[in-house]
Image (spheres, coloured by chain):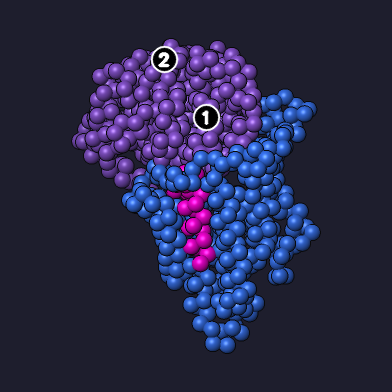
Chain colours: A purple, B blue
């Protein structure tokens, strides 16, 4: 509760006087994200990126309400009900985890509200389950994994061992990798969500005769895996999506991640003015380098601001068209929505490097250009 | 599955088991001696890991980090016992659960205040990193072997402490009849503080040892706490021997189940479905094990209480 009022206060201060002069805000955004517990780093980055964009935009008449879902679907659902019914928000955003998104997004859009996803992009919401009011500003879950599969082909890997946690995004991950990867699989494993000890999986990798390892283990799971993998003495190349190599966790992995190749739609060295300014202002504001989650939060806010400047949210059709136009300077450079309101964008190959004391990523190539997810074809939007 | 892979998985199970034991030993002592359900035991595990990460970051010494973990967790344990837990001995279990759950939240958010929301770096020292080759050609990380050795040494030490020392006698007496030992002139509240701090120190040590190969982050203790409760229920509440055997049973079941079940399903299903169903079933295995043990022995394998 305190968090909410703090965020409100911060936002009111940022949006200065116009909101007050009107007597009420033009547009109200409800952000439900993970701010406590194990996955908090991701939610905090999304929130900080989002609020940075709001602050930079100055007076937009947009009011933000922030709540913590604690990574629990039941709490996310309660918060969403509260935000829609008593806070009367117009737009919802913020959810990190796909299982929470599945619990909240369909009912939000069914009630005529807009949902802008800054992270989770489950396949179920991209194909037949797509909705005109649901926009994903990050990626469809499969995308980064497809890029990893494409990279594996160019790197000449023939025998991959693949693993991911047993939850919707984990299944999307392995499906995505297999869609692009042309070689054979020497093993395919689902681990427990939140698992921290990968000794058993690493033993299987060692015995499998694989020539490469693909893994999707976001947050703390990835830290554990990489440290244990580095200590196991196996020296097969590892490839994965950016989620285990984002700025928030690289410092905790340390040298064990050096040289690992990962795929991302964003990196701090993408060369455009919006991105340069974002990296600079984010570092100055929060005293740390931004992660891809922060860039997604930042882009989400800028998309919203661009749409709110063009159309009134009460006119749903006009507002939807304004969102769809994606008329904002993305940190990723070119950015457009496909027919299912998911991004069409480049996905890059990055390598973990060390800059002074800080571990970070450097782009070494492009895995997929102007890539759209495969589910778009099933979407009737 | 080859012999080498199987042997490696048995070692993995054993390693998970002994670390669970270090965690569960404190929990079972506190539950057995004081009759207290301490949900905040996982937070003490986290405190140990964070203290170790902070000290390792400052000094670069892993041994000092372990000492700091022991000291910080013991101090946190003693403090919590004197401030909060002491008021709960005569309350029913529901009040204890509520109060110690509140402690989890306080510890988690307090840690976040001090250290921030992002995971900390704590790594294996160089002299313990890398694999060693065991007889039979098994390559196994030296650090995990060290964990097994430390865990077994702690088990031995606790066994001697409980069976051979004056403190051990008092602990055992406290388990059986707390009024009587109070009447015999033992300072029961000091005894409780010592037992609680001892349990906390062990949890903190486990957190630091395991934190070096996992991620040191807020909320890291809770998943382990659940396993530790399963261990003490299987082993019998209050029994150190039960905790050791229960922990190794749980460790082996969890590790080998997770490996063998998907293999079993692969014999009559396609790969993706088999690994999905196999992993789902494997994560239930330890609870099935617990249920089976409780059906045969309702007080756990070595539980004295009825």
Q: Position of residue A206 (x, y in %)?
A: 61, 32
Say which element carries label 2: strand
Magenta residues, start to end: B198-219
Residue at (49%, 36%) from the top-left corner? A230
Give the crowd class for mark 1: few <14, some 14-19, many >=20 residues within 10 Å: few
Residue at (61%, 84%) from the top-left corner? B180
Residue at (73%, 53%) from the top-left corner? B291
Label 1: chain?
A
Residue at (42%, 52%) from the top-left corner? B62
Asked if residue B181 lies in the magenta stretch, the reply is: no
Label 2: chain?
A
Give the crowd class for mark 2: few <14, some 14-19, many >=20 residues within 10 Å: some
Residue A14 lies, with reference to residue B270, above or below; the image says below
Residue located beneath label 1 in the image: A235
Residue located beneath label 2 in the image: A366
Residue B55 lies, with reference to residue A126, above or below; the image says below
Task: Tell me the quadrant of the picture where the N terminus of chain B can be found.
Answer: top right
Spatial CA span between label 1 and label 2: 25 Å
Task: Tell me the quadrant of the picture where the C terminus of chain B can be found.
Answer: bottom right
């Amino acid at each position: 509760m305190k968090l909410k009022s703090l965020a409100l206060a911060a936002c009111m201060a940022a949006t200065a006087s116009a909101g007050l002069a009107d007597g009420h805000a033009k547009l109200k955004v409800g952000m439900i994200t993970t701010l406590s517990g194990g996955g908090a780093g991701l939610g905090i980055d999304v929130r900080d990126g989002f609020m940075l964009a709001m602050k930079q935009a100055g007076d937009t008449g947009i009011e933000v309400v922030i709540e913590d879902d604690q990574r629990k679907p039941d709490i996310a659902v309660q918060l969403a009900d509260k935000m829609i019914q008593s806070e009367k928000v117009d737009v919802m955003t913020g959810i990190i985890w796909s299982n929470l998104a599945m619990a909240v997004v369909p009912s939000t859009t069914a009630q005529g509200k807009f949902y802008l996803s800054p992270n989770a992009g489950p396949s179920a919401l991209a194909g037949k389950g797509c909705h005109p009011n649901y926009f994903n500003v990050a990626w469809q879950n499969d995308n980064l994994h497809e890029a990893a599969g494409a990279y594996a082909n160019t790197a000449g890997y023939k025998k991959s061992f693949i693993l991911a946690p047993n939850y919707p995004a984990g299944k999307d991950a392995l499906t995505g990798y297999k869609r692009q990867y042309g070689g054979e699989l020497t093993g395919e494993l689902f681990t427990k969500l939140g698992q921290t000890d990968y000794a058993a999986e690493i033993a299987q990798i060692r015995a499998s005769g694989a020539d490469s390892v693909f893994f999707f283990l976001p947050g703390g799971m990835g830290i554990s895996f990489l440290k244990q993998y580095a200590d196991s003495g196996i020296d097969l190349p590892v490839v994965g999506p950016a989620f285990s190599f984002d700025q928030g966790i690289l410092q905790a992995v340390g040298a064990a991640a050096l040289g690992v190749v990962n795929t991302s739609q964003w990196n701090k060295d993408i060369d455009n003015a919006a991105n340069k300014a974002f990296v600079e202002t984010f570092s100055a504001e929060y005293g740390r380098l931004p992660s891809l989650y922060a860039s997604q939060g930042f882009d989400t806010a800028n998309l919203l601001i661009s749409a709110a400047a063009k159309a009134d949210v009460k006119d749903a059709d006009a507002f939807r068209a304004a969102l769809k136009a994606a008329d904002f300077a993305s940190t990723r450079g070119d950015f457009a929505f496909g027919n299912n309101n998911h991004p069409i964008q480049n996905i890059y190959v990055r390598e973990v490097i060390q800059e002074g004391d800080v571990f970070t990523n450097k782009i070494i190539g492009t895995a997929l250009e102007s890539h759209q997810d495969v589910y778009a074809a099933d979407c009737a939007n | 599955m080859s012999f080498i892979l199987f042997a490696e998985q048995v070692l993995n199970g054993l390693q998970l088991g002994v670390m669970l034991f270090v965690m569960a030993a404190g929990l079972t002592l506190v539950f057995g001696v004081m009759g207290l359900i301490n949900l905040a035991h996982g937070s003490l595990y986290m405190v140990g890991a964070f203290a170790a990460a902070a000290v390792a970051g400052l000094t670069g010494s892993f041994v000092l980090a372990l000492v700091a973990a022991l000291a910080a967790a013991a101090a946190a344990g003693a403090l919590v016992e004197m401030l909060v837990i002491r008021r709960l001995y005569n309350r029913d279990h529901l009040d204890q659960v509520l109060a110690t759950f509140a402690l989890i939240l306080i510890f988690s958010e307090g840690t976040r205040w001090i250290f921030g929301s992002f995971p900390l770096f704590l790594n294996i020292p160089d002299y313990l990193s890398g694999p060693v080759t065991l007889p039979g050609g098994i390559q196994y990380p030296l650090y995990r072997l060290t964990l097994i050795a430390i865990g077994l040494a702690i088990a031995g030490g606790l066994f001697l402490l409980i069976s051979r020392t004056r403190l051990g006698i008092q602990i055992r007496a406290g388990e059986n009849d707390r009024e009587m030992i109070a009447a015999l002139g033992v300072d029961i509240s000091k005894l409780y503080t010592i037992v609680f701090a001892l349990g906390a120190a062990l949890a903190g040590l486990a957190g630091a040892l395991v934190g070096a190969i996992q991620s040191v982050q807020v909320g890291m203790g809770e998943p382990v706490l659940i396993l530790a409760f399963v261990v003490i229920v299987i082993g019998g509440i209050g029994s150190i021997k039960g905790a050791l055997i229960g922990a190794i049973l749980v460790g082996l079941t969890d590790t080998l189940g997770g490996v063998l079940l998907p293999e079993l399903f692969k014999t009559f299903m396609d790969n993706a479905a088999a690994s999905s169903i196999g992993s789902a079933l494997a994560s239930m295995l330890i609870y099935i094990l617990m249920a089976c043990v409780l059906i045969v022995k309702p007080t756990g394998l070595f539980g004295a209480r009825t």
